[in-house]
Image (cartoon, rainbow, N blue to C red):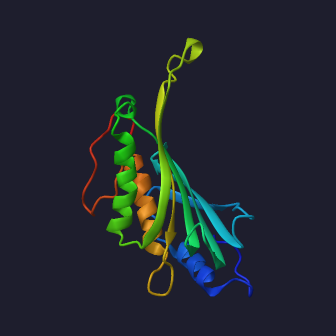
Amino acid sequence: MPANVTSFTPEPFARALRELEAMPWRSGLTTQEIGSPQRIAPHAVAISAELESGEDSLATGRLILLHDPAGNTAWDGTFRVVSYVRAEVDLDMVTDPLLPEVAWSWLTDTLATHDCSAAELAGTVTASYSKGFGEMTDADRADVEVRCSWTPTLDEAHPLTPHLAAWQDLMGLVAGQPQLPPGMATLPTGRGV
């Protein structure tokens, strides 16, 4: 799945690509490589992901890993993770003024839970609601979207895998489907799940 590794690929980025390819994604989460930005960093890989339950799509996301061996002063490092996660939520949840802070804490908590070394954390949380009219009266929809980026420490002692695990956990939390310990199940949410 990851971008082609050539003799010109720096070993730290090649190692990250191998870790991305070997990532054991949670059940229901499918990923695929997509085009990555070419002008932001000399080396980049991007994936899209969809978290599903049966035939229902619960969340979508993208993750981009950027690498500049010379470093980037804006990142304060040589790597940068850029992420986007979006999921439909209950209509009354989107009006809760605490939703942005809670959604941001999902990100920071998952990074902490997986012991990720993440600096220069930045991002936005958007809660949106759309109301249908006329022939679309049944089209009411509420979404939460978390866009974020951080500078990971990636080397032989600090792999990419914990950052990937944190990101997949963020997708589950945004979708209302947190990763549970083996043998545990979620209660129905009323969203057709």
Looking at the image, the residue that sits furthest to the top is 134
Query: Is residue 189 found left or right of 156 in the rendered image?
Result: left
Can residue 146 be spotted in the picture? no
Quick check: 137 above or below 109?
above
Image quarter where the C terminus lies is top left
| Position of 28 relative to 93 (above/below) | below
Horizontally, residue 183 falls left or right of residue 78, namely left
Q: Is residue 86 visible?
A: yes
- Residue 5 in the image: state x and y as whole percent: 70, 80
Near-viewer residue (12 or 24):
12
**Along the line of sight, which residue is nearer the eye, 130 or 108?**
108
**Residue 100 placement (x, y as % from top left):** 40, 43
Residue lying at 45% horizontally and 55% vertically, measured from the top left? 28
Position of 53 relative to 26 (above/below):
above
Q: Nearer the viewer, residue 82 or 49?
A: 82
Residue depicted at x 35% and y 29%: 92
- Give how far across and how far down residue 7 sits, in percent: 74, 88
Q: How many marks?
A: 0
Nearer to the camera, 29 or 59: 59
Give residue 13's quadrant in the image. bottom right
Residue 136 x/y as whole percent = 56, 18
